[in-house]
Image (spheres, grey):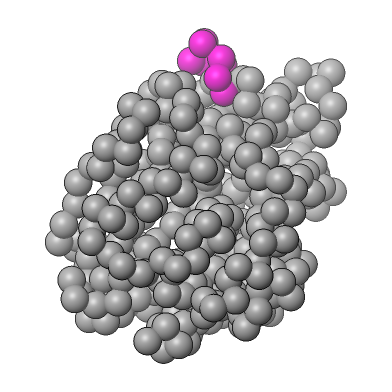
Amino acid sequence: MYPVGEAYASGWLDVGDGHAIWWEEAGNPDGLPVLLLHGGPGSGFSASMRRWFDPTRFRIIGFDQRGAGRSRPSAAETLAALEHNTTTHLVADIERLRRYLGVERWMLYGHSWGVTLGLAYAETHPERVAGAVFVGVTTTRAQEVDWLYRGLAPLFPHEWRAFRAGVPEETPETEMVSAYYRLLCDPDLDVAERAARAFDAWDNASVSSRPNAYVPGDTRRMLGRARIVTHYFHHLAWLEDGQLLRDAGRLADIPGHLVQGRMDLQGPLVTAVELAEAWPGVRLTVVDGAGHSGADTGMPEAIVAAVEDVAGRAG
């Protein structure tokens, strides 16, 4: 892994609809541009995402998606942040940022939800994508969301009981995301924050293949992230079910590399395999023993190797 380094440029970009997204650049201003797409949705950009990229070789661009991180308005502060906030809006924001920064074509790097968003962007604007590295592959199909918020229950029975107890008793298990979405949008902040803590605890139960003692984070950040996650997953990201796999043929001319932990519970390997079969020429690296976290054993080396592979093929 490489040193994270400091951003040399940053600011907010007005993208319309009352939203402004935070962006920043680091590395080599004359290097190969790469756009980092954070997960969640709603987790916000972290400078640690730059550690996969040689700062002497890459112009490293990150941004906070609508409602997340430093972008305005914040979903942690107002439900207005969920308005005009869909996958289509995010794809348009990426294009607006590309033009604003004067980038002709760039590499994409995405992890988890960042893969869903990266695929949506690349399939809409393939001529603007020089290559892509996707880690912890997700496409936000109904079956994937159901797995995350119901299917995993037998593997984490204690955590599931706590998660289940956070919604009204009569809530069907198939409606957990929708139930939490309503609670997180409740005008009573105590109700919303209690739901955010329960939602965050469940999400963190299955991140890593290593023992994962849950330590609650900042309540404000948890609330903002949980609101955006449930907003997107309740609406299945406003995508037709299976759309991103169906349209993966549009990526035929884009060098790609997928990195997947074999024990990834949040993004089971089957989705990465299906994407590899649908995307002509993409390469797939499966890391035995690793889960959804990029810090799991074997993942850092595999991610850096994938970045080097795609950068080499992207020219």
Q: Residue furthest top?
A: 188
Rendered position, 178 above or below 129: above
Instruction: Give percent across and percent down for residue 74.
Output: 37, 30
- Quarter of the image where one finds residue 264: bottom right
Q: Is residue 35 left or right of residue 42?
A: left
Instruction: Give percent across and percent down for residue 75.
Output: 43, 29
Q: Is residue 19 left or right of residue 117?
A: left
Rendered position, 54 above or below 240: below
- Quarter of the image where one finds residue 192: top right
Is residue 180 in view?
yes
Q: How many marks?
A: 0
Q: Nearer the viewer, residue 227 or 248?
A: 248
Rendered position, 231 above or below 91: above
Q: Nearer the viewer, residue 243 or 55?
A: 243
The residue that appears at 45% across and 54% down in the rendered structure is 38
Q: Is residue 142 left or right of residue 87?
A: right
The residue that appears at 58% across and 32% down in the rendered structure is 231
Region in magenta: 184-191
- Image quarter where the C terminus lies is bottom left
The residue that appears at 56% across and 14% down in the rendered structure is 186
Q: Nearer the viewer, residue 45 or 275?
A: 275
Is residue 289 in view?
no
Q: Nearer the viewer, residue 196 or 315?
A: 315
Q: Is residue 31 left or right of residue 244?
A: left
The residue that appears at 35% across and 69% down in the rendered structure is 105
Rendered position, 207 above or below 161: below
Instruction: Give percent across and percent down for residue 217.
Output: 45, 40
Q: Look at the image and say whether residue 104 sits in the magenta stretch.
A: no
Instruction: Give percent across and percent down for residue 252.
Output: 60, 76
- Image quarter where the N terminus lies is bottom left
